[in-house]
Amino acid sequence: MVTQKSKPAEHLEYEVLVPYQCPNQRCWYQKGDVVDLLPCEAEFLKLGGKVKAVLTTQQKEKANA
């Protein structure tokens, strides 16, 4: 049987819409901050309306291509 290695999850940048406290580091992020989040972390915060995705220049270039 072949064991497949999963690639590490990529962190993506998100802009903070509403101040929230990070449960792991116990620090507060303020409105307008840009944070790197894993997809599972981001999904939870997006559903709560606390963050939105930020398009970096590389992502914009890929979208325009």
Image (cartoon, rainbow, N blue to C red):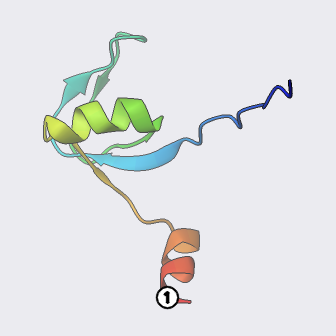
Residue 12: % across, % down = 49, 47
Name the one closer to the observer, 46 or 55. 46
For the residue pair 37 and 4, the one nearer the viewer reads as 4
Which residue, as the protein is rendered here, is positioned at the far bottom?
65
**Is residue 25 shown above or below 33?**
above
Q: Residue at x 42, y 65 (%)?
A: 55
Q: Crowdedness of circle 1 by 10 Å Cα count: few (<14), some, many (20+)?
A: few
Q: Looking at the image, which residue is at 82% across and 25% down?
A: 3
Residue most extreme to the front: 1
Q: Quadrant of the N terminus?
A: top right
Q: Viewed as shown, does residue 15 lie left or right of 8?
A: left
The quadrant in which residue 31 appears is top left
| Residue position marked by numbered label 1 in the rendering | 64
Could you tell whether 50 is left or right of 43 in the image?
left
Q: Is residue 56 above or below residue 41?
A: below
Farthest residue to the right: give it: 2
Instruction: Please report the residue visible at 48 percent of the width from the left and 34 percent of the height from the top.
Output: 38
In the image, residue 2 above or below residue 17: above
In the rendered image of this protein, does residue 48 appear above or below residue 32?
above
Where on the picture, by quarter, is residue 61?
bottom right
> As shown in the figure, which amino acid type bears the numbered disc 1?
Asn
Residue at 67% x, 34% y is: 8
Quadrant of the image containing the C terminus: bottom right
Query: Is 13 displayed left or right of 18 in the figure?
Result: right
**Label 1: element kind:** helix
**Residue 40: image x %, image y %?**
40, 31
Residue 30 visible, this orientation: no
Residue 5: give x, y in percent of width and height.
78, 31
